[in-house]
Amino acid sequence: MKPTTLVLALSMLLAAPAARAADTRPMAAIRATTDQILAVLQDPALQADDKRAERRSKIRKLVDARFQWADMAQRCLSIHWRRRSPEERKAFVPVFADLVRGAYMGKIEGYAGEKVKYKNERVKGKYARVGVDVLTTKNTVIPIVYSMKLFGDRWLIYDVAVEGVRLVNNYRTQFRAKLDRMPYQEFFDELEAKVAETQKGE
Amino acid sequence: MKATLLALCLALALPFAASAAEGEPPAPRPVEDDDPFAEEEKPVPPLADPIRPVNRAFYHVNDKLYFWLFRPVAQGWRAVVPKIARVGVSNFFGNLGTPRRFANCLLQGDLRGSGTELARLGVNSTVGLAGLADPARGWLKLRPRREDFGQTLGRYGIGMGLYLHWPMLGPSSPRDTVGSVADAALDPATYLPGAGILQRINHTSLHLGDYEDLKKRALDPYAAIRDAYNQRRRHAIATSD
């Protein structure tokens, strides 16, 4: 075997598909996470009702590994982020992540055979846009665009646009509507209560 | 009555022709953002909502209507009618929407789109069993162009102006309300008694859970819906999809 081929083979072995391996391309990163989530959903050992918590926990880890929650939270609070103390910011990020993640867990678990078509990928330096189409079982196509950034050696998502509706913009509008009318602490309490109520219903 | 409503909506829409600044200025971007895609993805100006109390009241009416009326009926429909039939009904009504999509593609100068719509109508109405199936998409990869008169008006520079949340109809604007009236005139389903309600119940039955999910992940569902409407309409006008 030629030396270069050997080195290549060895490096591929070392960069084996562990969850923390360096990402090569953003679309490949999305595909990897999607495939891993699908594998959990379709794992026969995790189908039973009493395995639901374990299944959720596995999917949650996969989702968390691909989203840059701190970046998203900052973008969603926008000008209000700058006015917050480091402690307030630290407290806000996980609650925000719970809100966004929690609602999508239901959708992920309701997976009923939808197909994902990976359409395109545009990379400009540390930023990227990955377009996918989700073919639903109702004969509709939902276009999704992931906004991604290279954090270290991993491509992470900091915004999602579904049919042109950007998630960050949507939350920024909602949060601004609230923060225009109430002090931050009241807003944060309401957010925490909302997350708690959502998690209770699961 | 309809003429008066039409005239009123046009009067509301015209002052906002080609308006860019609707209400407050867009939120400033994070300081450290050096996103090279920022140029093409300009921040979306918020949609002005000067009659918010009225809109919120109508939103609450729609919220109750969904949980008290549409959802239970749709659940009943779903229990009785298999999914393949309900998708068929959805395809059927989709096919009836061809005149609207065809006309608006033409008005926007999208000849390819209008041609696609004609092809889809031809194939789906015949091979597709009077529109119940969609072989045009499945076999021929001809996807529908989701165009409407509101988008056509938008292309010609008429802005949304302000947010309107109608009972039953939901999020809209003066421009898109005028558009909806024009679209209804071109839709054969408008002239079939009971077709509208069947279409609505059937559509709801295929999307049960979507509204509940929105409420679950929104701190302010009313603002979330208004913003989603704003973004979606701007995106739809900017793209030829």
Image (cartoon, coloured by chain):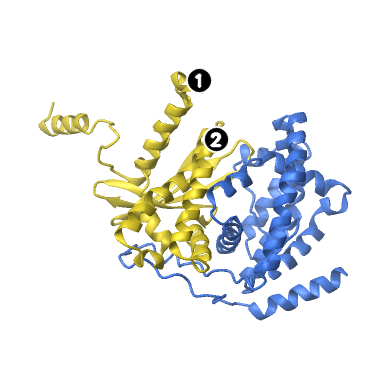
Mark 2 surroundings: few (<14), some (14-19) or many (≥20) residues within 10 A: few
Image position of A130 (left or right of A107) = left
Give the residue at mark 2.
Answer: A114
> Label 1 vs label 2: CA separation?
21 Å
The chain assigned the colour yellow in the figure is A
Mark 1 surroundings: few (<14), some (14-19) or many (≥20) residues within 10 A: few
Percent coordinates x, y for residue B95 in the rendering = 74, 46
Residue at 53% from the left image edge and 65% from the top image edge? A177
Image position of A137 (left or right of B70) = left
Residue at 59% from the left image edge and 42% from the top image edge? B141
- Protein chain holding label 1: A
- Protein chain holding label 2: A
Quadrant of the image occupied by residue A201: top right
Residue A179 appears in the rendering: yes
* Secondary structure state at the residue bearing disc 2: loop
Count of picture labels: 2
Give the residue at mark 1.
Answer: A48
Percent coordinates x, y for residue B77 in the rendering = 77, 35
Percent coordinates x, y for residue B87 in the rendering = 70, 37
Q: Are marks 1 and 2 on the same chain?
A: yes
* Secondary structure state at the residue bearing disc 1: loop
Percent coordinates x, y for residue A71 in the rendering = 35, 55
Do residues under tags 1 and 2 come within 8 Å of each other at their CB atoms?
Answer: no
Q: Amino acid at mark 1?
A: Ala
Quadrant of the image occupied by residue B72: top right
Q: Nearer the viewer, residue A161 or A199?
A: A199
Q: Amino acid at mark 2?
A: Glu
The quadrant of the rendering that contains the C terminus of chain B is: bottom right
The quadrant of the rendering that contains the N terminus of chain B is: bottom right
The chain assigned the colour blue in the figure is B
A181 w.r.t. A19: above or below: below
Q: Nearer the viewer, residue A102 or B113?
A: A102
